Amino acid sequence: MVAAIVFIFGLLIGSFLNVCIYRLPRNESLVFPASHCPACGAAIPSWLNIPVVSYLQLRGRCRSCAASISAVYPLVELLTALLGLALYLRFGLSLPFFILAFLCAALVVVTFIDLEHQIIPDEISLSGIVIGFACSFFIPRLGWLNSLIGILAGGGSLYLVAWGYERFTGKEGMGGGDIKLLAMLGAFFGWKAIPFIIFVSSLTGSVIGIAVMLIKKQDGKLAIPFGPFLVIGALVHIFFGAQLVAWYFNLFPGGGGPA
């Protein structure tokens, strides 16, 4: 029963995340105007704004102008609901569940904005750093000092990589958004999680990047946003990383953040 409620609530949160994904890069208000069709501007009534169901009911088209509705909308809603359900099954209705549910929602927004616009809004990363650091005071096994070092280690490590790449190649290889995103993850997980997240994100980024270049038959100049791979690293850490990080540092299981 609780799992079903968590899943339904996740669908509703995902619907709001769609608003964030569309409006944040365009510097539009998240509140006004109400939900409307991006093509014709027609208002969407509440009875046609039900997550996933309305998309299927309308067969992926606007009721007013018949313009195609992106499949990203139901995908975001389902992804958010599934992540919420997975967190509940992993942590129950505990403080880590609520903290990580908030973080995962932010990561969903980051992923889809970065994939489309290749930017990571400061509204997400900078506020996330503050919130993650504040949460560290309520997670004894994380601790504020560990979180603070995580912020510095996360942001600092990618800054050094970006600085070194630009210095030796004369080209910008990593944006400031990625640097702030890893600093945010350091705030939530602590510094011990940073090497793990960087390793997973670099590995998946390399594999997928090479595959995309081969498919599109383009050289190494193809620009691929790194933010989604940092998100993958963070999700792997949430569900599988605590034991691995603890083992790596020869500590007790469960160390390294809310997870």
Image (cartoon, rainbow, N blue to C red):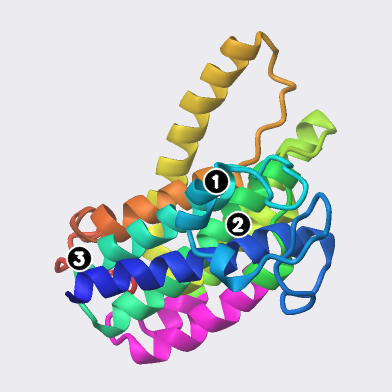
Callout 2 amino acid: Val
Mark 3 neighbour class, 10 Å CA radius: few under 14, some 14 to 19, many 20 or more: some
Q: How many marks?
A: 3
Which span is picked out in magenta?
Answer: 125-148
Indicate which disc residue 144 carries: none
Q: Are marks 3 and 1 in contact (CB under 8 Å)?
A: no
Please state the horizontal and vertical placement of residue 242, each as a whole percent of the image.
25, 61
**First-in-chain label (2 vs 3):** 3
Discs 2, 3 touching: Cβ within 8 Å = no
Magenta span contains residue 234:
no
Disc 1 vs disc 2: Cβ atoms closer than 8 Å? yes
Question: Residue 110 got which mark?
Answer: 2
Q: Residue at x 65, y 40 (%)?
A: 225
User: Residue beneath label 1, please?
Assistant: 228
The residue under label 3 is: 90
User: Which numbered disc flags the more N-terminal residue, 3 or 1?
Assistant: 3
Residue found 51% across the figure and 33% down from its top: 205
* Mark before the other along the chain sequence, 1 or 2: 2
Q: Is residue 16 visible?
A: yes
CA–CA distance in space, label 1 to label 2: 7 Å
Quadrant of image for the C terminus: bottom left
How would you rate the neighbour count of disc 1 (Cα within 10 Å): few for under 14, some for 14-19, many for 20 or more?
A: many
Q: Count residues near mark 2 (Cα–Cα under 10 Å), then give few for <14, some for 14-19, many for 20+.
A: many
Left or right of 159: which side holds 256? left
Q: Position of residue 128 (x, y in %)?
A: 58, 74
